[in-house]
Image (tube, grey):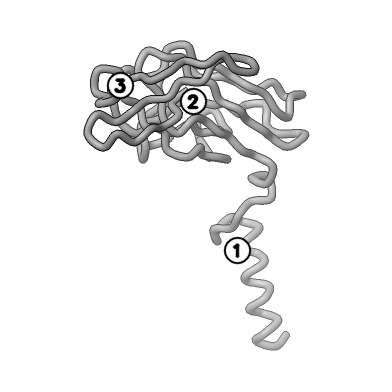
Amino acid sequence: MNVTLATFVVIVVAIVLGALPLLHAEDIGYSVSAPSSLLTGVPLTVQWTAPEGHGPHDWIAVFKEGASDWGWYYPWYTLEEEDTEGVVTFHRPPEEMGVYEVRLVAGRLVFETKAVSAPIHLVHPGSLDVNPLILVPGVGGSVLHAQDKETGSEKRVW
């Protein structure tokens, strides 16, 4: 056995035993998405995907950005094994303003994060410095625009 082949064998054994960090094949096909901002007290609706045959202990929860996998906010949502996509609504998201994220996690006692949403900025309605402009009926709901008091710029907020 030459050195090159020996090195290759050591790397393969390390990968199989999990000694080298890699993007695990099972992470492919997982996703979770949430709105970029949310008012406190408003339900948080999340869309998720998971590959066929995903684990029986896959779950979704809301976390303070950067918190450990043990730092989720109750409740969490457990994925059904046969489902590969869905929508879940957290009717009681955190009430404290800050930056949060939604994670799709696998495992019961040892957790492996499979997907993380973009940051969610949770704000209290009283903290916004905007004036509502107009509520226009739209397809499947309404559109709400707000205007910044200082700059006069408009932004679609709903």
Q: Quadrant of the N terminus?
A: bottom right
Residue 101: x percent and y percent?
43, 33
Residue 148: x percent and y percent?
29, 31
Q: CA distance from mark 1 to mark 3?
A: 59 Å
Which corner quadrant of the image does residue 81 belong to? top right
Label number found at residue 131 = 3
Mark 2 crowd level (few <14, some 14–19, many ≥20, 10 Å Cα): many
Whichever of callouts 3 and 2 sits on the residue coming sooner in the sequence is 2
Determine which residue is flagged by label 1: 14
Whichever of callouts 1 and 3 sits on the residue coming sooner in the sequence is 1
Identify which residue is drawn at 35% across, 19% down.
132
Which corner quadrant of the image does residue 14 belong to? bottom right
Identify which residue is drawn at 65% across, 64% down.
13
- Vertical order, 150 against 5 (above or below): above
- Vertical order, 51 against 126 (above or below): below
Mark 3: which amino acid?
A: Asn
Residue 135: x percent and y percent?
47, 15
Left or right, 13 with respect to 151, comes to: right
CB contact under 8 Å: marks 1 and 3:
no
Identify which residue is drawn at 77% across, 34% down.
52
Whichever of callouts 2 and 1 sits on the residue coming sooner in the sequence is 1
